[in-house]
């Protein structure tokens, strides 16, 4: 290829990535934090940042051992560098989720020997409504998925290398990424990767990949990443190991103690929705994967990645605790497998654009119908109409784009409008969802009562723990008549608990300067008992009582 043509191509690819990154980060600074996850994963780093204790995580002032600290550390660093904002609370999650796209591009390009296949694979991931929405919400899953897939992809690339000098850095990188994934969400990372490797060896009857894993240096790298924090937190908190490994891993998997019960087939429909823009491309991708030749070492990357999808879905389907985001690590691997098929049959891209437009329009219609039921009560938010309108406009643009079939010799950078439009449209619908009653954040509620909170004011959360209140209020609250996920920390807290509504009522009677966040139902029950105070603010499922 002539040098000037190469430069043009590189500039177009760079423009594609800059445009996609800008679209991905477009609303991170203007969306309020949602209950409960976004509040939780913004507040734990805030308390870490303020206290200076980077070893023992705390939520609302009590120890919180449900997850490891990597995302807390990343977010606390963002607070240190840029201040306390909604966008810094989301920065780690948003950036790590975004990094999966160039990661998919790099891996697909290398596996399939084509930079175009890499771009196509990245677009396949970027158009997935499931991946876009999951990556935009501040949970652990987006960053965990990227780190875990970095380990899996490095393993796949390393296993293809026949030269030990080329294989060693890739497999050591896989061990390091696996350690970071453990620090992000726990021991499920090596369980999934190890199970896939076991399944691969059983299916192929090839155990040579085990001999190429560089076990001693790899385990040393893994230990250097993982062990220091586990050792420090265990030394400071003797009951950590039992709670983290037994309660948060084995009990969560084997029982329904976390009350996240779903049928065994729960993840099947989710995976189909996640792949919905590309469903027509799946059969061809499966046939092409079967026909893909082995690497020089005999390793079969397409088979390994296919088994990875199966292991992740089956593993979490067997779990007693199921959440929608659990199978997020499937999507980057699926995109790598789909990329070449999009090049072979470009019509799949126009089909994906049409499918995306239909999905966006259906979702927007559903939100507008739900909002219309509230409009009679004067609760219809103008923001919903604005953002729903933006998403519909992008959906219409995608539909018209789909009316023009992709060229026979495709330039996948030209498919960028599909990805960028999908990313922006689904974020617009997320903004609509945020504005749709009932209120899913305490941001506006806190703004209404902030002037009532002085240094000596007692702040209660009664009957429930509103996760976004401490972040927006800038201080922890006193939990009353609720335990939930804070039970472990509350049992070990130095301050006294308020276990019942009766105990709260007694404390409230003694207070002269206090406010309390509670549900309308709890407020009605307490008012029936003659509890003094007045309602200072209300918003959907919660209100604020003031005692002055």
Image: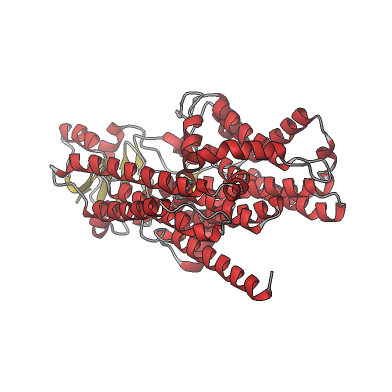
Q: Position of residue 232 (x, y in %)?
A: 66, 49
Give residue 32's quadrant in the image. bottom left
Q: Quick check: 482 left or right of 186?
A: left
Q: Is residue 66 visible?
A: no
Q: Quick check: 124 left or right of 546?
A: right
Q: Is residue 406 visible?
A: yes
Q: Residue at x 47, y 67 (%)?
A: 82
* The furthest residue to the front: 408
* Relative depth, front residue between 229 and 541: 541
Q: Quick check: 395 left or right of 545?
A: right
* Relative depth, front residue between 410 and 334: 410
Q: Position of residue 316 (x, y in %)?
A: 56, 31
Q: Residue at x 37, y 53 (%)?
A: 400
**Colour basis:** secondary structure
Q: Residue at x 82, y 38 (%)?
A: 210
Q: Residue at x 30, y 45 (%)?
A: 364
Q: Position of residue 357 (x, y in %)?
A: 38, 47
Give residue 370's quadrant in the image. top left
Would you place residue 249 above or below residue 392 in this image?
Answer: above
* Relative depth, front residue between 270 and 513: 270
* The furthest residue to the bottom: 4
């Amino acid at each position: 290829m002539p040098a000037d043509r190469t430069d043009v191509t590189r500039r177009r690819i760079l423009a594609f990535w800059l445009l996609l990154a800008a679209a991905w980060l477009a609303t991170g600074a203007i969306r309020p934090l949602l209950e409960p996850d976004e509040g939780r994963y913004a507040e734990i780093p805030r308390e870490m940042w303020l206290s200076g204790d980077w070893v023992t995580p705390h939520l609302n002032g009590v120890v919180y051992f449900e997850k490891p600290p990597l995302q807390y550390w990343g977010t606390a660093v963002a607070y240190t560098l840029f201040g306390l904002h909604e966008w810094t609370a989301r920065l780690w999650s948003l950036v790590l989720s975004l990094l999966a796209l160039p990661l998919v591009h790099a891996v697909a390009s290398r596996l399939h020997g084509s930079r175009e296949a890499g771009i196509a694979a990245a677009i396949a991931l970027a158009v997935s409504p499931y991946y876009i929405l999951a990556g935009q919400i501040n949970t652990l899953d987006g960053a965990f998925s990227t780190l875990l897939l970095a380990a899996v992809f490095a393993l796949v690339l390393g296993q293809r290398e026949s030269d030990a000098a080329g294989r060693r850095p890739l497999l050591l990188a896989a061990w390091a990424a696996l350690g970071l994934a453990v620090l992000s969400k726990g021991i499920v990372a090596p369980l999934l990767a190890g199970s896939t490797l076991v399944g691969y060896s059983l299916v192929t009857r090839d155990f040579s990949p085990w001999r190429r894993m560089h076990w001693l240096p790899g385990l040393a790298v893994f230990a250097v990443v993982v062990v220091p924090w586990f050792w420090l937190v265990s030394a400071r908190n003797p009951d950590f190991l039992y709670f983290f490994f037994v309660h948060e891993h084995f009990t969560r998997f084997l029982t329904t103690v976390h009350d996240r019960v779903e049928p065994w087939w729960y993840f099947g429909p989710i995976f189909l929705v996640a792949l919905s823009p590309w469903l027509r491309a799946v059969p061809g991708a499966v046939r092409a994967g079967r026909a893909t030749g082995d690497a020089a070492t005999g390793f079969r990357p397409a088979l390994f990645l296919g088994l990875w999808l199966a292991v992740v879905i089956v593993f979490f389907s067997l779990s007693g605790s199921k959440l929608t985001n659990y199978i997020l690590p499937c999507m980057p691997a699926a995109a790598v497998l789909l990329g070449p098929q999009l090049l072979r049959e470009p019509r799949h891209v126009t089909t994906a654009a049409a499918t995306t437009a239909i999905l966006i329009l259906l979702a927007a219609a559903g939100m507008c119908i739900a909002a219309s039921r509230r409009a009679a009560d004067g609760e219809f938010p103008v923001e919903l109409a604005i953002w729903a309108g933006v998403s519909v406009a992008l959906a219409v643009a995608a539909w018209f784009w789909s009316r023009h079939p992709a060229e026979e010799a495709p330039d996948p950078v030209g498919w960028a409008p599909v990805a960028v439009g999908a990313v922006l449209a689904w974020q617009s619908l997320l903004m609509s969802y945020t504005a749709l009653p009932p209120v899913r954040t305490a941001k506006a509620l806190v703004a209404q009562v902030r002037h009532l909170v002085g240094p000596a004011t007692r702040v209660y959360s009664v009957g429930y723990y509103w996760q976004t209140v401490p972040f927006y209020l800038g201080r922890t609250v006193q939990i009353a008549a609720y335990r939930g996920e804070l039970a472990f920390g509350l049992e070990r807290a130095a301050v006294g608990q308020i276990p019942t509504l009766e105990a709260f009522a007694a404390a409230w009677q003694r207070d002269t300067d206090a406010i309390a966040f509670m549900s309308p139902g709890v407020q009605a029950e307490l008012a029936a008992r003659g509890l003094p105070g007045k309602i200072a603010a209300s918003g959907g499922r919660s209100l604020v009582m003031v005692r002055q």
